[in-house]
Amino acid sequence: MIPDCCKGDKAGKIDSLAAFLRIIADGNRIRILCQLKSGEKCVCEVWKNLKLPQNLVSHHLKVMRKLNLITSRKDGLKVIYSLNMEEIAKYINQMNNLLSVYPAKNLNIQSPAANVAVTVNS
């Protein structure tokens, strides 16, 4: 029996979600997204805040822009970047829908790093 999340059109959504997860699996990209969470920034602000080479930050921004996770606009000679929350929300909802096929009633998840228990009630 094939789970509902893998049937028909949803299979394409899984590939899209996998691409999203590959993109954000890089620590530097997550740090860049965190920087943009506080508002629009040009590449010069991001690389200075993160102490990363400018060309590396530009590359990461290009990759995330290609997946439409961030948007850009020109401001004179600068390119200003911001989060595309609509697109990010789409991926978060896809992940939630994918994981919701498993029963989560009173699921107790232990976080060994923080030694914290999280209880999820459905």
Image (tube, rainbow, N blue to C red):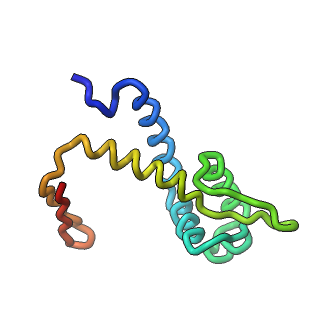
Residue 68 in the image, given as x and y percentages of width and height: 61, 49
Write the residue at 66% across / 70% down. Answer: 40
Write the residue at 21% across / 43% down. Answer: 102
User: The N terminus is located in which quarter?
Assistant: top left
Q: How many numbered circles are shown?
A: 0
Give the left or right position of residue 114, taking residue 16 as reference: left
Give the left or right position of residue 3, taking residue 47 as reference: left
Residue 119 in the image, given as x and y percentages of width and height: 17, 64
**In the orientation shown, which residue stands out farthest toward the bottom?**
49
Mark yes or no: residue 25 visible: no
**In the orientation shown, which residue stands out farthest toward the right?**
76
- Give above or below for 36 relative to 108: below
**In the orientation shown, which residue stands out farthest toward the left?**
106
Write the residue at 17% across / 59% down. Answer: 121
Mark yes or no: residue 70 visible: yes
Give the left or right position of residue 109, taking residue 58 as reference: left
Q: Quadrant of residue 84?
A: bottom right
- Give above or below for 56 relative to 40: above
Residue 34 in the image, given as x and y percentages of width and height: 53, 69
Give the left or right position of residue 109, taking residue 9 as reference: left
Write the residue at 63% across / 74% down. Answer: 51
Q: Quadrant of residue 56?
A: bottom right
- Give above or below for 39 relative to 97: below
User: The C terminus is located in which quarter?
Assistant: bottom left
- Give above or below for 31 relative to 12: below
